[in-house]
Image (cartoon, rainbow, N blue to C red):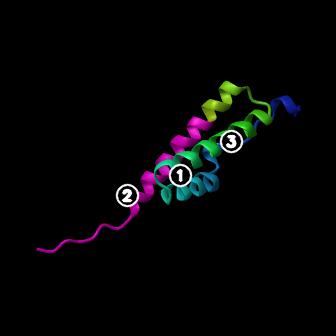
Amino acid sequence: MSPEKVRAFPIDRQVFLVREVAAKLGNLHGETATSFWRAKASELLDLIVGSGRDRTAAGDEVRRFFLAVQREMLAETIAEPMPVLSA
């Protein structure tokens, strides 16, 4: 198979990376969380562009990654046990 036909595994399907970023974001708040996400998004964008994708497609992939991170964070919130209230 020629190198032009090889495509990297999409970052939004890299479960370990999605969970790692979700866990980190879950422990950050406010400007710290925003700064972390911007740095991570920039790093991922550069990585994807460096692998040969055009900037528009790379930006779309980073957005899909962010949605995967948000879904992971929501799943973690839903999975947390809720306290049982008694009367």
Report whether 66 appears left or right of 86. right
Report whether 79 appears left or right of 47. left
For the record, the magenta segment spans 62-87
Which residue sits furthest bottom? 86
Which residue is label 3 attached to?
Answer: 44
Of badges 3 and 2, nearer the viewer stands 3
In the rendered image, residue 61, in percent from the top left (x then y), is placed at: 63, 35
Is the residue marked by circle 3 packed among few (<14), some (14-19), or many (20+) residues within 10 Å? some
Distance (Cα) linking label 3 and label 2: 28 Å
Residue depicted at 81% across the width and 30% down the height: 5
In the rendered image, residue 80, in percent from the top left (x then y), is placed at: 38, 64
| Magenta segment includes 22 | no
Which residue is label 2 attached to?
Answer: 78
Q: Helix, strand or loop at disc 2?
A: helix
Tell which of 28 and 86 is nearer to you.
28
Residue depicted at 30% across the width and 66% down the height: 82
Nearest to N terminus: mark 1 or mark 2: 1
Amino acid type for the residue under numbered disc 3: Leu
Which residue is label 1 attached to?
Answer: 32
